[in-house]
Image: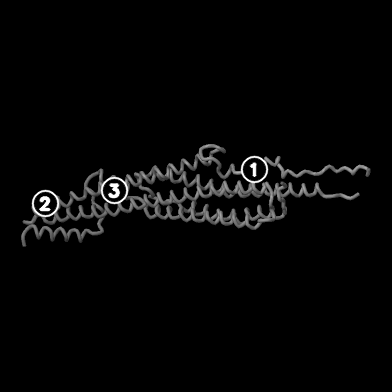
Amino acid sequence: MNPFTSGVIMLRFALGSSFGAAPFVSSAVRLGIAVGLGVSNPGSIWQAGDEWKQAANQLEVVKTRIANANAKVGPQWIAEDKDAYLNAVSVYNQEVDDLKKYLENVGTSLQAVAAAYYAFAAMAIVAGTFAFACAVAVGLAMATPAFPAVRAAAEAAVSAVAITAGAAAKTITAIAGGATAILLAGVALAKAFQSQPGGVKGADFKVITIDYSPLNGGNGYVAPRRELPGPAK
Amino acid sequence: MAQDIHVTSNAIRQLGKDLVEDAAPAFDPVARQVAEAAIEAPGFGLLGFALQGAYESAQGYLADYVAAGKGQLGTFRDKLDGIAATWEQAESANQVMYR
């Protein structure tokens, strides 16, 4: 058996024996990235995204029930103030639709962020375990004739760990994208919540009103003059 | 041309009641899901720590917003009650009285 073959065998042995070992990271920077990103809870982030999406779907129920209530009153209310009411409901439904889109967008952004964390964690574990295995192999081979071959193979292999840095960059980009989406959505919501009619986003829930002022604040029907008819001519 | 008018004040009041008692509770699961959408530690990790704060504030805004959406249906109900009362008043004022 030539030294290179035995070196590769030892490397494989080390890889197998260290499978599941804690990721070994050689530099402080890599350790910082791995801890900073790796110690996260992507499962919880994903689940939160799912909750937001489910909440979005639930809003359809609100609209359906309002539509049912409107259908029920039907021909029992035909007047101009009903038109004013229906206009208000139309604006209200638009607001519900906007809220639904917001919930869906944040849910999707959260899941994209969670996926990036998952990808990074998987990459970091594989790369870290591999680097650890290489270090073990080099250590085992130190007193054997295979040492130079094992070291060369290990050095070549460990350079692949640089992928971790690439994965981290991708993760950070994805997180930044998701964070931006969440932050912008939060800011938009804050503005909408404080908006006045004709403001940044127009009407929000609190300013929607049933406006029948053209009917002079009432329904426009006033009491007739209660006077006795004059004497017959 | 005269507008067709047909109004049952009871129907208007019932509409307000339906909005509050049937439609408004449909916001409750939304509010619950938003509250349950908390991201548990370590959340976004040490490097994403700032994101946790942004997320929680968005969650807070949303809770308020959903509450406002639900509350607005109560405001609609109050308005509808007012409209019903106005129609009742008009009807009463237009009753023909015989002396």
In the displayed structure image, the side of residue A169 where residue B19 appears, left or right: right
**Residue kind at label 1, given as amino acid type:** Asp
Q: Secondary structure at mark 3?
A: helix
Residue where numbered disc 2 is placed? A152
The CA span between labels 3 and 2 is 26 Å
Residue where numbered disc 1 is placed? A211
User: Can see residue B53?
Assistant: no
Task: Sort mark 2 into few (<14), some (14-19) or many (20+) by Cα contacts within 10 Å.
Answer: some
Q: Secondary structure at mark 1?
A: loop
Residue A51 image point, x, y percent:
46, 55
Q: Earlier in the sequence, mark 3 or mark 2?
A: 3
Residue B52 image point, x, y percent:
41, 45
Q: Which numbered mark, 2 or 1, is in the foreground of this view? A: 1
In the displayed structure image, the side of residue A111 where residue A231 appears, left or right: right
Q: Residue at x 42, y 45 (%)?
A: A182
In this rendering, do the residues under marks 3 and 2 share a single chain?
A: yes
Q: Residue at x 22, y 45 (%)?
A: A27
Residue where numbered disc 3 is placed? A34
Q: Earlier in the sequence, mark 3 or mark 1?
A: 3
Task: Sort mark 1 into few (<14), some (14-19) or many (20+) by Cα contacts within 10 Å.
Answer: some
Outermost residue toward the bottom in this view: A1
Chain where mark 3 sits: A
Q: Secondary structure at mark 2?
A: helix
**Residue kind at label 2, given as amino acid type:** Ala
In this rendering, do the residues under marks 3 and 1 share a single chain?
A: yes
Rendered image coloring scheme: one colour
Task: Sort mark 3 into few (<14), some (14-19) or many (20+) by Cα contacts within 10 Å.
Answer: many
Q: Earlier in the sequence, mark 2 or mark 1?
A: 2
Q: Residue at x 59, y 42 (%)?
A: A207
Residue A208 image point, x, y percent:
59, 44
- Total marks in image: 3
